[in-house]
Image (tube, helix red, strand yellow):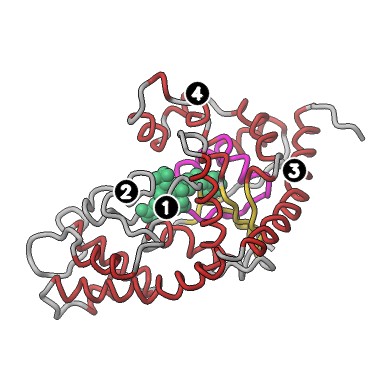
Amino acid sequence: MAISLSGIKPTGKLTLGNYIGALRNFKAMQEDYENFIFIADLHALTLPIDPIELKTNTLDIVAFYLAAGLDPEKTTIFLQSDVSEHSELNSIIQNYLYMGELSRMTQFKDKSRKLNDSAIGLGLFAYPALMCADIILYNADIVPVGEDQKQHVELCRNLVHRFNTRYGKEIFKMPEPVIPKVGARIMSLSDPTKKMSKSDPKGDIFLKDDLNIIRKKIMSAVTDTGNEILFDKENKPGISNLLTIYSALKNKTIEESVQEFSNLHQYGEFKKMVANAVLDELGPFQTRYKEIISNRKYINEVLEKGAIRAKKIAHKTLIKVKKTVGLYVHE
Ligand code: ATP
Ligand code: LTN
């Protein structure tokens, strides 16, 4: 069975962007792939974060994974920091990535721009090395992510090629990013030219928001002049974003949704239908989340079982890499 792997870093409250671009696709993978889904808690440390907040965010993501339908019998759910092989492989493969290519990463440029030079941590710069270790430890064939993470997976592909060429064999499998056709980049509702982002929230819909608040946020989303429901990212970014949200949640193509609304010449009515689509999805999701988050024993069991299963595979890869590069492994 081919292998799928992905993760989310617990840096803040998850948004509808995370749900559409990532979370909901993780479940789709568990039927056809051997599925590894983790919480990238080590990555969350690449920017300053309060320890209590980190822990709360982490537990929330586990509950979100389960509420989204990940089945611990089919998907290995675990914390990155529970499997020390991630850090060990990171310290080996970081030597095969170059400063030049790391400094070209858009995420690094965006995040470091907001900091003083003296406050940019080494971990933020080296972020993609750890991400690459996450991927290759499990021999992932595919990596389902939103648009913004594609560049990191591409960098990992370069590393795989470089490493395999250097050692003359297929040590690592070549991973493929899988980006959703609709909803790979959900934009902010108050500024549809900016990505909806959990660490830089602007008019975002959070997965835990009260349903009435969610409706209000959608009804007051920034739209554009005119009254036609058309997909035009340049001239109608607000309407295009709402069309994307609607289409993704209804499993429709953008064209199908545009067709559906072709007789509607009122943004208000359109927004109501988008809000209904979001509430239909998030209502039951929130009910499941509340049940799971109050059952800490179950969450612990899922994570413990997941870490044991993940470690078995990760350890094998680490030994193979150590042998390949010439580190002495006691036989
Ligand atoms: P941060 O603001 O801390 O960088 P983020 O909201 O961008 O966080 P990540 O943890 O980086 O979230 O991403 C988790 C997953 O969600 C990734 O696969 C990412 O591509 C996806 N994702 C994040 N934001 C969006 C968005 N606005 N639209 C679609 N997918 C998204
Ligand atoms: N960088 C990703 C989280 C992440 C990840 C990974 C995703 C860390 N390691 C490996 C896929 C595969 C993010 O910010 N969403």
Circles 2 and 4: CB distance less than 8 Å?
no
Residue that mark 1 sits on: 13
Could you say whether the residue bearing mark 4 is in a helix, strand or loop?
helix
Question: Which class describes the residues within 10 Å of circle 4: few (<14), some (14-19), or many (20+)?
Answer: few
Magenta region: 129-158
**Whole-Å distance between the Cαs marked 2 and 4?**
30 Å
Left or right position of 138 against 281 = right
List the residue tagged with mark 4.
99
Identify residue type, mark 4.
Met
Pick whichever of labels 1 and 4 is earlier in the sequence.
1
The amino acid sitting under disc 3 is Thr
Quadrant of image for the N terminus: bottom right
Q: Amino acid at mark 1?
A: Lys
Per the image, the residue denoted by label 2 is 201
Q: Are marks 2 and 3 in contact (CB under 8 Å)?
A: no
The Cα–Cα distance between marks 2 and 3, rounded to whole angstroms, is 38 Å
Q: Are marks 1 and 2 in contact (CB under 8 Å)?
A: yes
Say what secondary structure mark 2 lies in: loop
Give the distance between the C-alpha atoms of the residues marked 1 and 4, in whole angstroms. Answer: 31 Å
Closer-to-camera residue (285/107):
285
Residue at x-position 78% and y-position 50%:
312
- Element at badge 3? helix
Q: Residue at x 37, y 71 (%)?
A: 249
Q: What residue does disc 3 label?
A: 317
Q: Is residue 4 above or below residue 108?
A: below
Q: Position of residue 5 (x, y in %)?
A: 60, 54
Crowdedness near tag 1: few (<14), some (14–19) or many (≥20) residues, C-alpha within 10 Å: many
Query: Does the Cβ of the disc 2 residue fall within 8 Å of ligand 1?
Result: no
Check disc 3: other Cα within 10 Å, few if <14, some if 14-19, many if 20+: many
Q: Main secondary structure of the magenta part?
A: helix
